[in-house]
Image (spheres, helix red, strand yellow):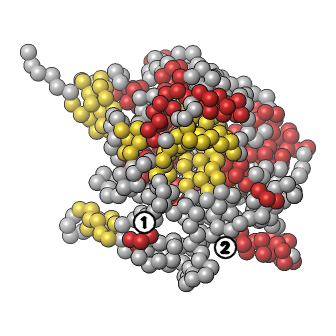
Amino acid sequence: MSVNLDVLQAHLESALAGKIESSVIALGELTVEVASQNWLEVAAFLRDDSVTSFEQLIDVCGVDYLAYGESEWDNSGSGFSRGVKREFSFDGSDDPAEAVEFEGKRFAVVIHLLSIKHNHRIRIKSYCDDNEFPVMDSVEGIWNVANWFEREAFDLFGIMFNNHPDLRRILTDYGFVGHPFRKDFPLIGHVDMRYDEELKRVVYEPVSIEDRTLVPRVIRTDQRFSPAVEGND
Amino acid sequence: MPEIKNFTLNFGPAHPAAHGVLRLILEMDGEVIQRADPHIGLLHRGTEKLAESKPYNQSIGYMDRLDYVSMMCNEHGYVLALEKMLGIEAPIRAQYIRTMFDEITRILNHLLWIGAHGLDVGAMTMFLYAFREREDLMDVYEAVSGARLHATYYRPGGVYRDLPDTMPLHEKSKWYSDADIRRLNKNRGGSVLDFIEDFTQRFPHYVDEYETLLTDNRIWKQRLVDIGIVSPERALQLGLTGAMLRGSGIEWDLRKKQPYAMYDQLEFDIPVGTNGDSYDRYLVRMEEMRQSNKIIKQCVDWLRVNPGPVMHEDHKITQPKREAMKGDMEALIHHFKLATEGYCLPEGEAYAAIEHPKGEFGCYIVSDGANKPYRLKVRAPGFAHMSAMDELTKGHMLADVVTIIGTMDIVFGEVDR
């Protein structure tokens, strides 16, 4: 890529001082974190400024940080046995209500931008302030393509977008309940659907299969990736 | 004066021209489209959610099933994102193999596109011609991976195995006589590379045949010229990528601009359109097939003279050789760990994009240090193209909707994910 990311980062930090919370270059990608109230302003700046000129929005993506950093394999306590998943609780407690309690901001919206003119990319990220009712400003007015991407984030994560022209569900079925990509939505779902011979229509029933985990999530510290030993090899 | 009202027409979801399961709600004034509201998601399988509950390698197969006519390109996008986070690079021979198969896949994709597009618009012969050539390329897929469509051939750290020395032969059956078998096996005597090279020699002639049928065809031009015009500014706003963007005159190709694999070592050109209509996009894709053919030829030449490993040596990530597993304790442990637990990615996030036959295909991975992705987002080009449907069809006739679906090269596996 042509433009040096350091230069771009320095430019953003001076031009948007006070509006961006952090900017990091990792793995050759620039990530800028923005507070949700500055979201639109920063987005418009990134498109219109002559140094950045991100004419194209590549992707809008929702992320749910509810279970971030949680391992399923519990070494100390009862452990994880026979692949049967308990009610959602990664922390070993059997009370699902307790597990949903979450500190910090849960939902984030991540945007990937591309500048055709300067041939560089950026990722901007913002956390929604309210965990119960996540809201973010819509960038549809800045990049029209965001329309469907934001509908998708709304559908799958339940993130509401302010001033979106047409915020409907997009990928899930007509009449679907819930937001399936949230971490507290089970992989097997809540309902089964089948055609009922007697009623002559499709009926929904509570899900009949059991949630199984064949490979548990494990988080291990890998020596190769820890920064302390990076200099050694 | 009688009151004239718009009426609403339901198109699909099982219409043959809908290229899968597209349901369009068309608001029409007579035969003119006022508004198109595509209803997608009828093929939504939750690939990204499924990937969150599986070790990284087990999701490679899901990538094939996203855009199920350009399988290996999808794998490439995913595998690149993994490699970026792991900080490894595939050996150079694997990179060449990937480049070659990306281009084979591009031809496969464009052949299906021209076949289906032709069929929709009324040129049925194209479908038969295109599938004749697809057959050869899918045989190549089968020879290297064992599967004709869903290959799962790319792995983080390389490709599953090196190119085989022999091309599988057709056998006599009640469907094939001796004469058929002789004809079918004529160019399969050598290695897979020989077969691919033979194909690259035949293919330019085939493209000439297609162009003879279509390029100056009066009906074809009547159906395509000036249909679905996109200006360069709108193309950027609407997030169009790939041939849809190049058809509008913007010279943008990730293979040139942000090269991955071996594209910076190879010689090829980027075709660009001028008017941004369906006909220009047709011309762009036809030329892309010729360019892909050229790239394949260069890769074959390189692969012939440069043997070497095709898999990364770090067995914490890639499977050890099966022979080693039988005698070596270390290798056995590695195999066991990889099969039961997979490998962990360092904490962080990465986005890797490739020039997919349809546009920019990217994978955004968020990892919290576990052996499964915390969040995997697949950026499918078709999704953005589909969202431009309303703007592209506005003011066109009902019959042009079919042309526009065709020119967007829609595959629902990737739109719905």
- Residue B142 at x, y percent in the picture: 69, 54
Question: As shown in the figure, which amino acid type bears the numbered disc 1?
Answer: Glu
Question: As shown in the figure, which amino acid type bears the numbered disc 2?
Answer: Thr
Q: What element carries label 1?
A: loop
Quarter occupied by residue B60: bottom right
Q: Name the residue under label 2.
A: B340
Residue located at (46% from left, 17% from top)? B226
Quarter occupied by residue B169: bottom right
Left or right position of A161 against A8: left
Farthest residue toward the front? A18
Residue located at (84% from left, 74% from top)? B330
Label 1: chain? A
Give the quadrant of the N terminus of chain B. top left
Q: Mark 1 points at which residue?
A: A101
Q: In this view, does A189 lie above or below A93?
A: above
Farthest residue toward the bottom? A78
Frontmost residue, B401 versus B5: B5
